[in-house]
Image: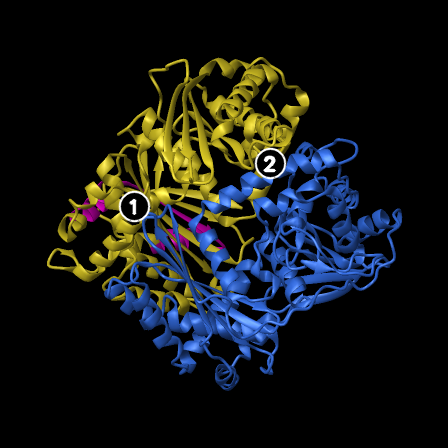
Chain colours: A yellow, B blue
């Protein structure tokens, strides 16, 4: 596998050449510092662009063409990445070796059509497509509370820092949607093309120069490259103890969220030490949380912890009965305390490291996962697979103990279910 | 080992049945680091009533028992947790139960021999006690409550329950809080001894493996063990009528947008096509009529009846095929009326059929690189068709309008149930 980066004026082009896969992926990222109104604009924009364009005047015609191109997949995703919002236009298609001649170019052009040829009348998005997209988004925004386990996390984060990037809802907001019309959205779209940092990734069995020439010719974007946005959210204020908040919802199960804020991790600690800590604590069925709360005490079915490295948060989640709230919280606090006191041994470390080493090898099985590694390197300074394999084995018990003083209790949130 | 080629997928499958009846399927995959192994039994929630091994009378055990048993397989007499074993080797372990099978799995690029041996060993060593059975009830109760809060799960299970009269696919895999609380260790041993004989089980291995090496590991492992003599397992047979159990039900839940499920059931006993072809034709039919390329969906969105597309599934219950359609929708009557207008139009455009065939064959190529998808394909073939098909690409190429129309002549959408999940307020 070979990688080459072309540092252009308007965009960076990253090409990963490999003949391992039958499929190819092209991903075009637009990145900018995150402001709240961006979220709803981009959520709506991604839907509007997939409703129709100048060459395919309806979603149905777009779907038919995707089938004609041997079931090519097109996605537009918006990701909140700490302080940054990323809108990704992605296509995955079968290499033309397996379909027919010229399919590679046709598939990429199909993506370009969606990106560059929107359905515009009189300087604004065509009304019917805009309306259909807006109705879909309204429904999605309203549906956020229908999944109590994910909704409990949203509510918990809003308790920590309402109206800050940590707590923004990735789907968008009804109140912001009301301020967007066909014209303002089109202006937003043009501004996004002009002002965002653009990175393009291509992975597959390709020729570097051919792809570079192709993009130079076909990917015409009037953008000036800007300085890279900074993703990581750092905290300045730590309560040092938990605040407990409960809200009620008519559900069978209650959803518990416990959040710790983390500060001043070094790059090595972010990439390797904290993930090892998290694995031991609640990273799977062999973790402290799973063993104590579920297996020994039968108090839950799901329980796990996550290290959100971009927001510097350690988040523990469990589905429980409301009556067991105090008991579960006590068990979780004890599990964290025991870990912080050093009540773990080398075998725990080895398990974590072995699991990560396996996961690095598995990344190489997927062209999308490989692409994500290069994007993480570009945006966050993450290591490539070879470096990861060398670095993870350096993590020691002492390093894990050193970070425990950087983990600060912040919030216990219970979305308390009741059904009678 | 017998070798079979997956047409158009650049994959080969190696198969061998051992003396004890255990069948092994191995698909080596180039350019893949990972190895994914499932050790499965042909036992799921549908075997509700059966004659246990060594007995004469049919028994009915509590619903949810196959899934409960799966949970308890992770208890071992030496106290070592399988999750710990696999974690030490950087591998992931898990298990799952559905209507038709229970699978125990691991995935990881290293320690293949140890991992495979351990998988065979722990699944072939049940350890059920009164204490560990009692302990699991709290855990599975929480699992049931979790699913009860998921609107689409409630919708799907409610719809299936009302669509089917007698066939045991009617009942949820997980059981109910009441049924799982009545399970005893004796019940678990009864199910285990009947369904976990190697002759009722299979191993599917995909990824970075050498088939001969895999086979030798399993042979050596199994040669050290003895098993009771296998006998055909007698399960209850069901007569499923054409009519549905209940035509409409409305449930209130914590949702903001109503969810609707529509289920159709039709008899396939007189259709002279393989079950596999029936699945292909019906999937294509509903995709053409109601999918993203259909005029139906375009009309529904323009009339503000739907915002999104539909989820559509085909599920067979031996004598009948069911089609399940799920949507978010406030205008239920209009939606049903329009769906039925389109699906009762049996005209199929040949060009459209050919395009759909192209997409399905393309999908085979996409999944041919995925260690999990290929493994699932083999397992699903085994439990549904009792064999693994490797000629899907050819079958799909040969799908034609005449056969399609012939199938459609036998289909009716008269037998229908509707399930609605409405907001509580």
Question: B288 or B353, which lies in front?
Answer: B288
Q: Residue B384 sits in which quadrant?
A: bottom right
The answer to whether residue B157 is above or below residue B299 is: above
Neighbour tally class for label 1: few under 14, some 14-19, many 20 plus, Cα within 10 Å: some
Return the mark for residue B138. Answer: 2
Q: Mark 1 lies on which chain?
A: A
**Where does label 1 land, which residue?**
A141
Does any portion of residue A231 appear in the rendered image? no
Front residue of this view, candidates B414 and A219: B414
Quadrant including the N terminus of chain B: bottom right
Q: Nearer the viewer, mark 2 or mark 1?
A: 2
- Residue at the image position 40 percent from the left and 73 percent from the top: B288
Name above or below for residue A154 compared with residue B29: above
Give the camera-side residue of B327 and A236. B327
Residue A212 lies within the magenta run: yes
Secondary structure under the numbered disc 1 in the rendered image = helix
Distance between the alpha carbons at the discs numbered 2 and 1? 34 Å
| Badge 2 element | helix
Residue B144 locus on image (x, y percent): 54, 44
Q: Where is residue B52 in the image (x, y as percent from the top left)?
A: 78, 56
x then y, percent, for residue A159: 33, 26
x, y percentage for residue A410?
40, 20
Q: Is residue A227 above or below residue A409?
A: below
Total marks placed: 2
Instruction: Indicate yes or no whether the magenta region holds residue A79.
Output: no
Q: Which residue is drawn at 57% across and 68% down?
A: B316
Indicate the chain on which mark 2 is placed: B
Question: Which label was assigned to residue B237?
Answer: none
Magenta region: A187-214
Q: Does residue A415 show up?
A: yes
């Amino acid at each position: 596998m070979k990688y080459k980066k072309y540092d252009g004026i308007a965009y960076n082009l990253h090409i990963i050449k490999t003949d391992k896969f039958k499929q190819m992926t092209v991903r075009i990222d637009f990145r900018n510092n995150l402001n709240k109104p961006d979220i709803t604009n981009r959520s709506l924009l991604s839907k509007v662009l997939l409703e129709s364009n100048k060459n395919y005047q309806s979603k149905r015609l777009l779907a038919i063409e995707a089938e004609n191109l041997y079931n090519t997949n097109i996605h537009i995703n918006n990701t909140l990445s700490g302080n940054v919002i990323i809108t990704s236009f992605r296509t995955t298609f079968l290499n033309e070796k397996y379909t027919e001649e010229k399919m590679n170019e046709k598939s990429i052009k199909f993506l370009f059509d969606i990106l560059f040829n929107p359905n515009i009348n009189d300087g604004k998005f065509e009304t019917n497509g805009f309306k259909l997209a807006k109705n879909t988004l309204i429904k999605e925004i309203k549906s956020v509370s229908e999944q109590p386990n994910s909704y409990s996390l949203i509510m918990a984060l809003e308790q920590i820092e309402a109206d800050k990037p940590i707590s923004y809802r990735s789907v968008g907001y009804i109140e912001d949607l009301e301020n967007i019309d066909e014209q303002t959205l089109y202006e937003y779209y043009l501004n996004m093309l002009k002002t965002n940092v653009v990175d393009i990734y291509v992975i597959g069995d390709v020729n570097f120069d051919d792809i570079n020439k192709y993009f130079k010719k076909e990917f015409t974007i009037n953008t000036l490259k800007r300085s890279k946005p900074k993703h990581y959210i750092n905290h300045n204020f730590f309560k040092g103890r938990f605040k407990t908040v409960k809200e009620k919802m008519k559900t069978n199960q209650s959803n518990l969220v416990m959040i710790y804020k983390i500060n001043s991790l070094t790059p090595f600690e972010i990439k390797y030490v904290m993930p090892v800590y998290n694995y031991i604590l609640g990273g799977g069925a062999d973790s402290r949380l799973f063993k104590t709360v579920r297996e020994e005490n039968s108090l839950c079915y799901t329980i796990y912890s996550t290290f959100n490295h971009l927001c510097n948060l350690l988040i523990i989640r469990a589905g429980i009965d409301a009556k067991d709230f105090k008991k579960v919280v006590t068990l979780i606090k004890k599990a964290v305390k025991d870990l912080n006191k050093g009540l773990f041994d080398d075998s725990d470390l080895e398990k974590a490291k072995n699991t990560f080493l396996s996961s690095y090898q598995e990344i190489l099985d997927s062209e999308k996962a490989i692409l994500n590694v290069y994007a993480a390197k570009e945006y966050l300074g993450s290591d490539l697979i070879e470096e990861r394999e060398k670095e993870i084995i350096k993590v020691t018990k002492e390093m894990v103990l050193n970070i425990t003083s950087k983990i600060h209790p912040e919030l216990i949130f219970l979305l308390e279910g009741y059904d009678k | 080992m017998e070798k079979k080629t997956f047409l158009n997928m650049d994959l080969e499958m190696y198969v061998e049945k051992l003396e004890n009846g255990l069948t092994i399927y191995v698909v080596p995959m180039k350019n893949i680091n990972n190895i994914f192994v499932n050790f499965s039994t042909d036992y799921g929630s549908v075997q509700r009533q059966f004659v246990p091994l060594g007995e004469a009378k049919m028994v009915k055990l509590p619903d949810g028992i196959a899934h409960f048993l799966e949970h308890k397989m992770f208890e071992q007499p030496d106290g070592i947790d399988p999750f710990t074993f696999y974690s030490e080797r950087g591998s992931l372990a898990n298990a799952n139960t559905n209507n038709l099978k229970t699978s125990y799995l691991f995935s990881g690029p290293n320690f293949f021999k140890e991992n495979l041996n351990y998988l065979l060993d722990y699944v072939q060593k049940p350890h059920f006690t009164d204490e560990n059975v009692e302990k699991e009830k709290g855990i599975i109760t929480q699992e049931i409550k979790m699913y009860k809060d998921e609107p689409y799960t409630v919708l799907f299970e409610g719809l299936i329950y009302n669509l089917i009269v007698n066939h045991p696919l009617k009942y949820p895999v997980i059981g109910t809080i009441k049924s799982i609380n009545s399970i005893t260790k004796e019940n678990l041993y009864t199910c285990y001894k009947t369904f976990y004989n190697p002759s009722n089980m299979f191993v599917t291995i995909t990824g970075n493996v050498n088939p001969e090496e895999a086979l030798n590991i399993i042979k050596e492992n199994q040669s050290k063990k003895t098993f009771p003599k296998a006998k055909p397992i007698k399960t209850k047979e069901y007569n499923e009528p054409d009519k549905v159990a209940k035509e409409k039900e409305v449930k209130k839940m914590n949702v903001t947008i109503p969810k609707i499920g529509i289920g159709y059931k039709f008899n396939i006993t007189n259709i002279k096509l393989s079950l596999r072809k029936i699945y292909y034709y019906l999937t294509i039919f509903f995709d053409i009529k109601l999918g993203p390329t259909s005029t139906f969906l375009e009309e529904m969105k323009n009339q503000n009846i739907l915002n999104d597309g539909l989820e559509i599934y085909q599920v067979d219950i031996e004598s009948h095929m069911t089609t399940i359609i799920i949507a978010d929708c406030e205008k239920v009557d209009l939606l049903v009326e329009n769906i039925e207008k389109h699906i009762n139009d049996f005209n199929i455009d040949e060009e459209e059929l050919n395009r759909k065939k192209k997409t399905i064959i393309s999908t085979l190529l996409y999944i041919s690189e995925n260690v999990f998808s290929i493994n699932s394909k083999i397992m699903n073939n085994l439990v549904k068709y009792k064999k693994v098909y490797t000629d899907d690409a050819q079958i799909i190429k040969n799908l034609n309008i005449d056969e399609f129309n012939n199938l459609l002549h036998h289909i009716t959408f008269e037998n229908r149930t509707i399930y609605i999940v409405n907001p509580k307020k």
